[in-house]
Image: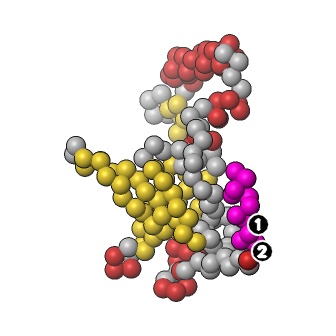
Amino acid sequence: MVGNQFRLGKQFFLRYNDHSKNFFTKLINRLDLRKTMKAQKLTKETISALGVTPRAFPEFAVGDSIALSQWITEGDKKRLQVFEGDVIAFSNNGASTTFILRKIGANGVAVERIFPYYSPVIDSIKVLKKGDVRRAKLFYVRDRVGKKARIKELVLTKEERALQAEKQSEK
């Protein structure tokens, strides 16, 4: 036995009485938080909806090429900078919803950025082209180089374009 520890296999475990005070204070704080949430009548759905404000972005999905305008602060000045790339992943987590944009930068070096969907830094999003993909996450694109790294564009017929225009006009 070494100090307040005893050994089981390769793992060391602390004795229960060393951290019991800290454990119980955390447990009590957690229970108090649950009581206040119940008192305010907050459910899981209302908690997950906190911080979610409707954004006027066009609908985009994984595989689409988009141009994202974001606010950049340099000293006292604020300016818009455009980040143009392909959406390779989208993660829906309520107010923590994020998406990953990948673009090929200078000298063929790929740049990926994770953007929070509900961030006030994002000014606008413009969909440049729709991608024809069959997966929810396009992480395999990271291993590809050159023309193989491109995402096939979704080509629509005149009738399909007319239907999309009707749907957007209804909204």
Name the main secondary structure of what is drawn in magenta: helix
**Relative to residue 160, is residue 89 drawn left or right?**
left
**Label 2 crowd bin: few (<14), some (14–19), many (20+), radius 10 Å:** few
Question: Image point 55% across, 21% down: which residue?
Answer: 26
* Mark linked to residue 159: 2
**For residue 165: magenta?**
yes
Gap in angstroms between the C-alphas marked 1 and 2: 6 Å
CB of mark 1 within 8 Å of CB of mark 2? Answer: yes
Question: Image point 61% across, 19% down: which residue?
Answer: 33
Where is residue 128? Give x, y as percent.
Answer: 54, 69
Residue 18 can be seen, yes or no: yes
Of the residues shown, which amino acid type is indicated by label 2? Answer: Glu
Disc 1: which residue: 163
Above or below residue 38? Residue 86 is: below
- The span shown in magenta is 160-171
Where is residue 75? Give x, y as percent.
Answer: 22, 45
Where is residue 102? Give x, y as percent.
Answer: 48, 67
